[in-house]
Image (spheres, rainbow, N blue to C red):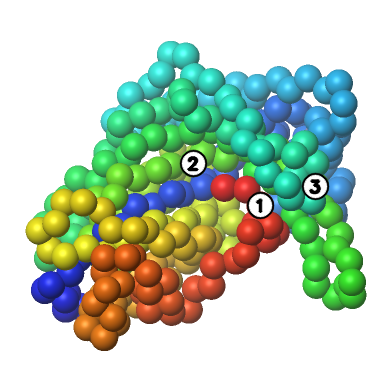
Amino acid sequence: MAHDPLYETVIGLEVHAQMRTQSKIFCGCSTTFGAEANTQICPVCAALPGVLPVLNTELVQMAIKTGLAIQGKIRERSEFSRKNYFYPDLPAGYQISQFELPIIEQGELHVVTDDGNKKKIGITRIHMEVDAGKSLHEGIQGFSWIDLNRTGTPLLEIVSEPDLRSSQEAGAYLKKLRSILRYLQVCDGNMEEGSFRCDANVSVRKQGQTRLGTRTELKNLNSIRRCRCPGNPTLGRHLEHHPSHARQGRGPRLSLFPRTRSPPAGDSSGPH
Ligand SMILES: [Zn+2]
């Protein structure tokens, strides 16, 4: 795929990988996919007053395994934080995540680029966090159902450096990362069931420029093919007609990933 010689695409990826623990992150409820709505919940999942979360050791072990596999720095002390969201499928009103002291920092992953060379992609951090529940809208007029089975399901958020330069590289990175997680048996990598989800931060800048352009965030790219197939020729054409977008970072949203729609805030996909 030809690149526009004047501009380059800068991509950083955030992957949410669901860990294959037996139980949820802070309680003993099952994490099995596909059960009848609200059959895998308890007072912790429903965030009832007075509940005390107990951290799942298996999750910490899986996070450390993943950190070692990407040659990351394992923190001896890491910390959870609350991130406030006002979503109906998040009864606590906040997501428990890690902010200042994530469990893993400064890892790397090697991918083969379009021209056949090996390239190191930095991994900024990996942190542990909880997933939200699900709002169900289909087939119901005027109101929604809430299914809390997924609430408290453990996730690792794996954040890359903005080191990727094309959708092909992004695809190669995702494939490599998914195969590592599968090999470690910490994640089944199933994108259709949402156990491996990807958000992309994309910006465009003139070749040779070091400062990053304004980024566009693309949520929930739910297949690797979607990250790979569209690509730079479309983006190049777009920029020919709207060169100011390279500076402002507007525009590539639909032309780079034409078949992907970013859902509105509060969508059933929950917090990120
Ligand atoms: Zn529970």
- Specify the quadrant of the image occupied by residue 208: bottom left
Where residue 16 sits in the image (x, y, percent)?
51, 47
Q: Amino acid at mark 1?
A: Gly
**Residue 233 in sight from this viewpoint:** no
Q: Secondary structure at mark 2?
A: strand
Distance from the alpha carbon under mark 3 to that under mark 2: 21 Å
Instruction: Identify the residue at image location x=49%, y=41%.
Output: 157
* Residue at numbered disc 2: 157
Q: Is residue 257 above or below residue 180?
A: below
Q: Are marks 3 and 2 in contact (CB under 8 Å)?
A: no
- Specify the quadrant of the image occupied by residue 95: top right
Instruction: Identify the residue at image location x=12%, y=63%.
Output: 207
Q: Is mark 1 within 8 Å of ligand 1?
A: no
Which of labels 1 and 3 is toward the front?
A: 1
Q: Amino acid at mark 3?
A: Leu
Q: Secondary structure at mark 3?
A: loop
Q: Earlier in the sequence, mark 1 or mark 3?
A: 3
Where residue 226 sits in the image (x, y, percent)?
43, 71
Q: Earlier in the sequence, mark 3 or mark 2?
A: 3
Instruction: Identify the residue at image location x=83%, y=23%.
Output: 51
* Residue at numbered disc 3: 148
Residue 79 lies left or right of residue 257; in this view the side is right
Q: Is mark 2 within 8 Å of ligand 1?
A: no
Where residue 120 sits in the image (x, y, percent)?
19, 45
Residue 264 lies left or right of residue 89; in this view the side is left
* Residue at numbered disc 1: 270
Q: Which mark is residue 225?
A: none
Instruction: Identify the residue at image location x=58%, y=33%.
Output: 97
Where residue 47 sits in the image (x, y, percent)?
82, 33
Q: Secondary structure at mark 1?
A: loop
